[in-house]
DNA sequence: ATTACTACTCACCGAGTAA
DNA sequence: TTTACTCGGTGAGTAGTAA
């Protein structure tokens, strides 16, 4: 309805329309059109002046804001080349603690702080994907642009490059999914880092099901 | 609904969702979400596969087209600097026939053909605006970009520049509204030219009410 | 001609529930 | 756990009509 009004010009200017005309445009009765105008006015989405020859209608700022919001959201969806986010489900399990060893390396830590915006808790949360669907999605995810963490050397050895994606765990906790680039782990396993100790923060235990929403880069 | 599905990623990929989850996102019951998915599938706006753990949903090409259409239309409305069209109402009256004299001038005719895409019938349809509202809108219209017809000279005299706007008369007949730039006519009068003789084409007589939809330039 | 009120109806929504 | 059926109540849309 708001959209139809905008379409006939009420977005930019005051337009004079009869409720009958609007009703035809919208495929409803004149009475319904009239009532809807009254409702839009109550929401203060339009300014409305009733005259003998029709209604003078103009979208208010909040009415315009409604359409602009819808427009921006559609723009993100329609114009994006790839999904904005992807959701996984899996169960938590305990690894061998080697994740902690890598995360603690200053060569990685500095880049995490700079590129992810947080100092990771020294340890990773391991998640095993439960369905074929999730594994397929994971493979698809790998083809989308990520935050790149460069490899480095210290006195004793070389550390490989890593890809990260920002994530939201169980719709609450921020963190990042990390993929080691060289070593090819089991594709059913996700490794998560976060500023906090997630097992405490979200009271997660082994074998518990969790939801991971992964955000790709624009 | 289609929009909500797109928002969770079904625009670009197949997503797995439960009807319960969708229902919460949309603020309706699980049953309604389920039924709406079935309806969207019937419209072939989505592809739908029901599994034991939820539905695999992806927008079909026609579903995407729906959102893309809405997006493009909103884009025109939201991003336009000025109204796309303005509508007038007025009554037809007979002028002194001087309109025909000007329209017949080759200096104008050539430009009309080139810039409006039609060879005008030698005569103008005069319309008198009936309400203050229409006259205000007419004044506003003058500030929006128009098709410019240049002035010229022939052996005997000078002809001034003219502004045109494409129009639709009574939602049917194409034509153009013309404004002489120099001479300042009565601002309650509109002069229309068209490829056909409008009085015959639309069976218009003097004192009859007509609707003029004027399109501004982007 | 308008707008918009009061009644009324019917389609849509959701509770219950089966599979 | 899921999805999705039936069914009954309710609110959005419409007809009639006043102003």
Image: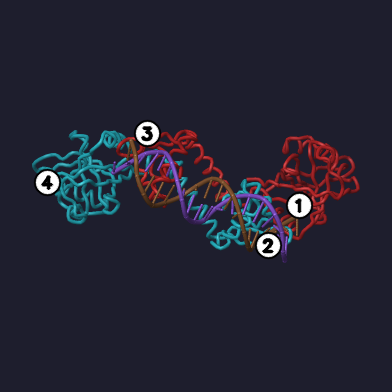
Chain colours: A cyan, B red, C brown, D purple
* Front of the two marks 1 and 2: 2
What residue do we see at 82% from left, 51% from top? B91
- Asked if marks 1 and 2 fall on the same chain, the answer is no
* Residue indicated by mark 3: B49
Q: State the residue in front, A206 or A60.
A: A206
Vertical relation: A57 (above or below) D3:
below
Output the chain of dot 3.
B
For marks 2 and 4, the one nearer the N-term is 2
Q: Residues within 10 Å of mark 3 (few under 14, many from 20)?
A: few
Quadrant containing the N terminus of chain B in the rendered view: top left
What residue do we see at 17% from left, 56% from top? A200
Q: Residues within 10 Å of mark 1 (few under 14, many from 20)?
A: many
Disc 1 versus disc 2: distance between alpha carbons?
18 Å
* Front of the two marks 2 and 4: 2
SS under mark 4 = helix
Disc 3 versus disc 2: distance between alpha carbons?
50 Å
Disc on res. A50: 2
Q: Residues within 10 Å of mark 4 (few under 14, many from 20)?
A: few
- Asked if marks 1 and 3 fall on the same chain, the answer is yes
- The reply, left or right, for residue D18 in relation to residue C13 is right
Vertical relation: A150 (above or below) A54:
above
Q: Where in the figure is residue A127, as x and y percent of width and height?
A: 20, 43
* Residue indicated by mark 1: B89
* Residue indicated by mark 4: A101
Disc 3 versus disc 4: distance between alpha carbons?
43 Å
- Asked if marks 3 and 4 fall on the same chain, the answer is no
- The reply, left or right, for residue B8 in relation to residue A29 is left
The reply to whether residue A129 is in sight is yes
SS under mark 3 = strand
């Amino acid at each position: 309805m708001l959209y139809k009004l905008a379409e006939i010009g009420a977005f930019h200017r005051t337009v004079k329309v009869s409720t009958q005309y609007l009703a035809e445009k919208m495929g409803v009765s004149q009475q319904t059109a009239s009532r809807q105008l009254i409702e839009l006015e109550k929401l203060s989405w339009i300014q409305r002046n009733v005259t003998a020859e029709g209604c003078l209608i103009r979208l208010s700022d909040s009415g315009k804001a409604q359409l602009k919001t819808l427009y921006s959201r559609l723009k993100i969806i329609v114009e994006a080349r790839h999904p904005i986010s992807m959701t996984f489900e899996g169960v938590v399990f305990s690894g061998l603690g080697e994740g902690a060893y890598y995360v603690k390396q200053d060569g990685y830590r500095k880049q995490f702080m700079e590129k992810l915006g947080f100092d990771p808790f020294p340890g990773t949360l391991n998640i095993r994907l439960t369905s074929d669907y999730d594994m397929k999605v994971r493979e698809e995810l790998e083809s989308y642009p990520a935050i790149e963490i460069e490899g480095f050397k210290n006195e004793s050895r070389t550390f490989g490059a890593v890809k990260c994606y920002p994530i939201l765990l169980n719709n609450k906790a921020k963190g990042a999914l990390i993929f080691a680039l060289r070593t090819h782990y089991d594709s059913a396993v996700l490794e998560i880092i976060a500023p906090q100790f997630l097992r405490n923060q979200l009271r997660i235990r082994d074998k518990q099901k969790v939801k991971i929403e992964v955000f790709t880069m624009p």
